[in-house]
């Protein structure tokens, strides 16, 4: 399963959730807010979509549950695993390469 996932581009919601967790552990509501901010308001996840993403990331071992001191509302917090960080970095490298190729292509068309 990991080989297929490593070859396929990440969906934008998955990428944004991983990016948010790369900074610090977060609970669901913070992830919802971060994805909106990181996408400049373009991506507004429903809680169902977010928890579907979280479930898949937990199964893939890209994130893990994280115990916090805030137990006032039984919030589940999550953090990025080293495997998740590796896939996030690979996706970022893929996106950078794609952007470089597109920029070079457009420059050659303008000349």
Image: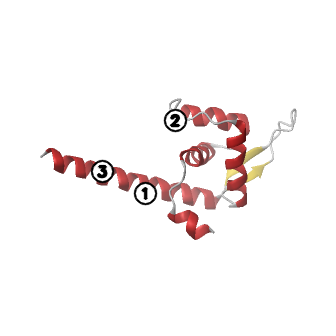
| Quadrant of the rendered image containing residue 35 | top right
Q: Which residue is mark 1?
A: 94
Give the alpha-carbon distance from disc 2 to disc 3, as whole Å.
21 Å
Residue 2, compared with residue 63, is above or below; it is: below
Query: Looking at the picture, how far across and down is residue 6, in whole percent?
Result: 54, 64
**Pointer 2 residue:** 39
The reply to whether the C-beta atoms of the residues labelled 2 and 3 are less than 8 Å apart is: no
Q: Indicate the position of residue 37 as horizontal and vertical percent values.
A: 55, 31
Task: Answer few, some or many: residues within 10 Å of disc 3's Cα (few below 14, many 20 plus, some between 14 and 19).
Answer: few
Label 2 to label 1, Cα distance in Å?
18 Å
Q: Which type of secondary structure does the marked residue at label 3 adopt?
A: helix
Color encoding of the figure: secondary structure
Say whether marks 2 and 1 touch (CB < 8 Å). Answer: no
Q: CA gap, disc 3 to disc 1?
A: 12 Å
**102 versus 1 height, above or below:** above
Quadrant where the N terminus sits is bottom right
Q: Which mark is residue 45?
A: none
Q: Residue at x 15, y 44 (%)?
A: 110
Number of residues whose C-alpha sits closer than 10 Å to that of mark 2, classed few (under 14), some (14–19) or many (20 or more): few
Q: Nearer the viewer, residue 101 or 92?
A: 101
The residue sitting at 72% across, 44% down in the picture is 51
Q: Circle 3 sits on which residue?
A: 102
- Residue 100: x and y, percent? 31, 52
**Residue at point 36%, 54% (across, down):** 98
Labels 3 and 1: the sequence-earlier one: 1
| Residue drawn at 68 percent across, 42 percent down | 50
């Amino acid at each position: 399963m990991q080989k297929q996932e490593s070859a396929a581009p990440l969906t934008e919601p998955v990428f944004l959730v991983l990016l948010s967790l790369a900074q610090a552990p977060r609970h669901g509501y913070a992830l919802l807010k971060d994805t909106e901010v990181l996408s400049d308001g373009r991506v507004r996840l429903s809680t169902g979509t977010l928890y579907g993403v979280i479930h898949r990331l937990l199964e893939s071992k890209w994130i893990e549950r994280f115990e916090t001191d805030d137990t006032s509302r039984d919030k589940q917090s999550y953090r990025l695993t080293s495997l998740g960080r590796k896939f996030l970095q690979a996706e970022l490298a893929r996106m950078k390469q794609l952007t470089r190729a597109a920029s070079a292509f457009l420059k050659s068309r303008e000349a």
